Amino acid sequence: MNLIDFSACSKACMDCSLTCTTCAASCIEEGGMEEMMKECIKRCLECADICNLCARTNQRGSAFFSDICSFCADICDYCAAECSKHTSNHCQQCAKVCQQCALECRKMAV
């Protein structure tokens, strides 16, 4: 039983981090497509890292949380823009999750 109350932003960030990591791994596993998917992989890994940071700063009440949320939203948009260019299910799913995360982060970036 989870006794810790995670905010919608933290939940969205963790979901996005995991989805981006899965998308990057799936792009690599497709074999022979690494060069074509290089930008997608890079953006997904960057997004996953920033989303992790955002969730952690949210949970500990960092003084920089609002700034990190704003940055995270921008990174999520950046990742979604690339993933939405590709037809694979994992890229399309990643784009949607990134868009949702950006929305939740912008609510917190005040």
Image: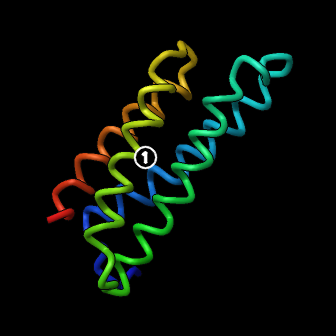
Residue 35 position in % (x across, y down): 78, 21
Q: Where is residue 73 in the image (x, y as percent from the top left)?
A: 33, 50
* x, y percent for residue 52: 50, 65
Left/right placement of residue 96 relative to residue 89 reads: left
Residue ID for mark 1: 75
Specify whether 95 is left or right of 9.
right
Taking 94 as reference, is 31 above or below it?
A: above
Residue shown at 31% from the left, 62% from the top? 69
Q: In which quarter of the image is residue 77?
A: top left
Label 1 sits on a secondary structure element that is: helix
Quarter containing the N terminus = bottom left
60 over 68 or under it: above or below: below
Specify few, some or many for label 1: CA neighbours under 10 Å numbering under 14, 14-19, or 20 or more. many
Q: Is residue 51 left or right of residue 63?
A: right
Q: Residue at x 28, y 79 (%)?
A: 5
| Residue type for callout 1 | Ile
- Up the image or down, 106 lies above or below 23; here it is below
Q: Residue at x 44, y 76 (%)?
A: 56
Q: Residue furthest top?
A: 87
User: Where 50 sits versus 87, above or below?
Assistant: below
Q: Residue at x 36, y 81 (%)?
A: 59
Q: Residue 16 placed where, x, y %?
A: 45, 49
Give the image quarter of residue 61: bottom left
Quadrant of the image containing the C terminus: bottom left
User: As drawn, is 16 to the left or to the right of 7?
Assistant: right
